[in-house]
Image (cartoon, rainbow, N blue to C red):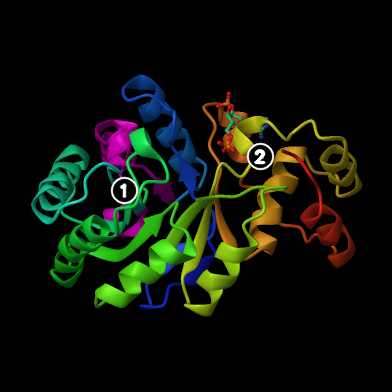
Amino acid sequence: LNEFIELANGVKIPKIGFGTWQIENGDEAYQSVTNALKNGYIHIDSANGYGNEASVGQAIKDSKIPRDQIFVTSKLPSHIKNYEEAKKSFEETLNNFGFDYVDLYLIHAPWPWSNIGSKHDQGNVEAWKAMEEYYKAGKIRAIGVSNFSPSDIQNIIDHCEIVPLVNQIGFWIGRDQEDTLDYCKKHNILVEAYSPLATGKILKNPTIVEISKKYKVTPAQLCIRYCLEKDTIPLPKSTHEDRIIQNSQVNFKISQEDLKVLENLKTN
Ligand code: A2P
């Protein structure tokens, strides 16, 4: 939890983050984030679209950990594809958190969730320009994207000044993201892995269970370690304190041989 990777702009990002997707605003988000912080997590991944920024911000404040010791991410809602609205939304995020800056701010997706796969190249460029301004003004320490394909990122690189520093994608054992991983590596873009447990759906996979026994870890720990071995930053989430602790204890190495098996595993 206390190890970092350096982004292309020199900002250090903690290697494991605590995800908060599907954790409801109010008690649930407040308690989960409080538990995560109490157990050593210093990287919290949130989003305006999760509706829980206020509880996340409150939990961070109440932890009494200095703000600059915690790495906080939020995201621009995926339906916002113009400059003015992007600015308004970012101000709202700061307000929800009660912070005067965020560490990482991402375009949540290249298309609105209501129309997955639709093309919004111009809109993404507009949103990005608003983010570049806040970045330059010191209100965002690093800017990036989420759910972007290589061509979505190339559009930003071709039409904007700052190359995205991060791409956050759904990544877990069995989810083939090789093209995106290769592209991001080439452009020095760090990949973050959301749902590293495939929202819990791959934890009973027989191969994952068998290999995890060999390392005397749980299937969840193997899944999280796998993301680290693939040079991505896993963002596991749980509402249970014992699992929150377990998910951070991944200090082991997966052998090259087992890594190959996991890379070729079909988990659907
Ligand atoms: P819960 O919140 O009840 O602990 P992902 O991070 O891939 O989205 O997966 C999150 C899901 O996996 C949640 O449903 C969470 O349930 C469950 N989960 C998280 N950590 C563990 C763990 N260590 N063992 C089993 N299930 C887990």
Label 1 crowd bin: few (<14), some (14–19), many (20+), radius 10 Å? many
Count of marks, rendered view:
2
Rendering coords of residue 171 (x, y %): 60, 50
Describe residue 7's horizontal placement relative to residue 243 as left or right: left
User: Are dots 1 and 2 in contact, CB under 8 Å?
Assistant: no
Rendering coords of residue 37 (x, y %): 44, 42
Q: Quadrant of the C terminus?
A: top right
Residue identifier under label 2: 246
Q: Quadrant of the N terminus?
A: bottom right
Q: Earlier in the sequence, mark 1 or mark 2?
A: 1
Magenta-span inclusion, residue 226: no
Residue farthest toward the top in the current orientation of the protein: 27
Question: Could you say which is closer to the camera, residue 175 or residue 102?
Answer: 175
Describe residue 201's horizontal placement relative to residue 4 as left or right: right
Residue identifier under label 1: 74
Rendering coords of residue 65 (x, y %): 33, 49
Rendering coords of residue 61 (x, y %): 26, 41
Callout 1 amino acid: Ser
Q: Quadrant of ligand 1?
A: top right
**Which residue is at a point 56% across and 41% down the rendered structure image?**
195
**Mark 2 C-beta closer than 8 Å to ligand 1:** yes
Give the residues drawn in magenta, as a range. Answer: 43-71
**Which residue is at a point 53% across and 79% down the rendered structure image?**
186
